[in-house]
Amino acid sequence: MNQTARQDEQYRRMTQAPIPGLILSLCAPSIVTSLITSIYNMADTFFVAQIGTTAVAAVGVVFSISSVISALGFWMGTGSSSLVSLHLGAREQEKADRTASTGFYLSMAMGALIAVCGLLFRTPLMVLLGSTPTILPEAGAYAVPLLLAAPFQCSNLALSQNLRAEGMSRESMTGQMIGGLLNIVLDPLFIFGLGWGVFGAGVATALSQVVVWIALLQYYLRGKTVVSLSPRNFRPEGALLGGIFSAGFPSLCRHCGNALSSIVLNHAAGAFGDAAIAAFSIATRVSGLALSVSIGFVHAIQPVAGYAHGSKNYKRLKDAYRFTTAASVSALAVIAAGIALLAPWIVGLLTPTDRGMIGMGAAVLRFSCAALPFTTLVNCTGTLFQAIKESARSSVIVLGRQLCVYIPLVLALQRLFGMTGLMLALPAADVLSSVAAVWMARQFFRRLGDGEVPSARGDELRVIRK
């Protein structure tokens, strides 16, 4: 199939296929990809837990670095991919190529900058992230290989996001799966076989990121994609950069907000000892595993919304949002109930050397589970606005949740109720944020109406005014 035929086929699929089937077909590979990523993150925690509670806490502290790297990668990846979907929906191939290429090469440069700065200021960085004196040596050792791999981790996100933007979720899943399985195999080899401890866990994760980068890039190099990443398409021009930066800004806010929240939480939990930091670290990893389902739906709605908005099919845009939020909230509610039921067993599995942590860890995990259905509602709504270049609304949802609701609740509730207040902060923040997100979505769709609904006949597109 030649390039033009591939583009036409993909356009028809993304603008005409029934919403439920299309969303589910796109989200299934993304869910698998996110699950694999979460599983190999969990693998680090599981194998590191065999060393001790301090090692688990160290992994939790360094998680903030991964959040910052992800923030930059998603900034460029989601920013460029959102525009790519819009350009492809409007049949603007050259603009799509320039946007995807610029996002990819910028993400590489940003990852390299993080690597250099992080390695130069590693010790003060670990203290800033919440390391106690007992955690600091292990956190520093774990961080080194992760920082070296930052350019690959950052650009991996741009590669995978742009694959999804043109509907190639399966290809994105395959690349992530290869890296995830490799990480799980290398963790015990490096940690115990070579005796590298926490440093070995970091090396395993870093090598996996490099392999994922190679696996994803080869689709573009072999001409299997609709868009091209040729260096000739790299155009760091003002208008293009502004479009990528603004479209991806909500993702930057989301992940930087997560990193800042983790730092604040680590410092607050540190008042209750290393075990409390470890308990929240475990809850974050397990919740991340559950939120893989939410991420799958988020990745599915982004290209569908972009194509629908680019082709001015506003009814399809509304239908996509309604189906995605209903399906993701229902799925996360069921998953949250299952995790809450199994919480003591899960925590015991991840803390085999410290059985005294099970009670605290299970309580933290159950409070985190209560937030999951509301978290996915906020994520889907923010991504909808981001996909259609309503970056201001998306940023308000994301920043409001983290900076205006969650962090103040962490600080206030810890003072009022101690450890219980820390656990209560997350579900309380997500309930309040989901109410605001739904209100914003309703106001937007009420003003938008059904708009213009395109109808395809043959190779032409005519617009029917409802």
Image (spheres, rainbow, N blue to C red):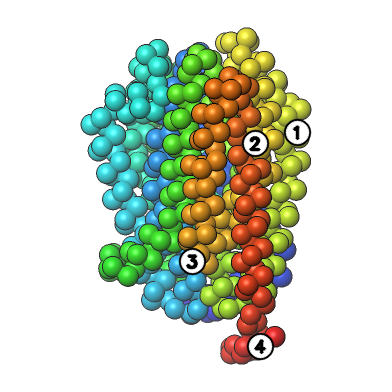
With respect to residue 456, does 114 lie above or below?
A: above
With respect to residue 418, does 27 lie above or below?
A: below
Q: Which residue is mark 3?
A: 389
* First in residue order: circle 4 vs circle 2: 2
Q: Which residue is mark 1?
A: 338
Q: Three-letter amino acid code at disc 1?
A: Gly
* First in residue order: circle 1 vs circle 3: 1
Q: Is residue 17 left or right of residue 105?
A: right
Q: CA distance from mark 1 to mark 4?
A: 47 Å
Residue 222 in the image: x percent, y percent? 41, 63
Regarding residue 343, the answer to whether it shows in the image is yes
Regarding residue 2, the answer to whether it shows in the image is no
Residue 299 sits in which quadrant? bottom right
Q: CA distance from mark 3 to mark 2?
A: 29 Å
Q: Is residue 397 left or right of residue 192?
A: right
Q: Are marks 2 and 1 in contact (CB under 8 Å)?
A: no
* First in residue order: circle 3 vs circle 2: 3
Q: Are marks 4 and 2 in contact (CB under 8 Å)?
A: no
Q: Is residue 99 left or right of residue 23?
A: left
With respect to residue 201, does 89 lie above or below?
A: below
Sort mark 4 into few (<14), some (14-19) or many (20+) by Cα contacts within 10 Å: few
Q: Nearer the viewer, mark 1 or mark 4?
A: 4
Q: CA distance from mark 4 to mark 2?
A: 43 Å
Q: Secondary structure at mark 2?
A: helix
Q: Which residue is mark 4?
A: 465
* First in residue order: circle 2 vs circle 1: 1
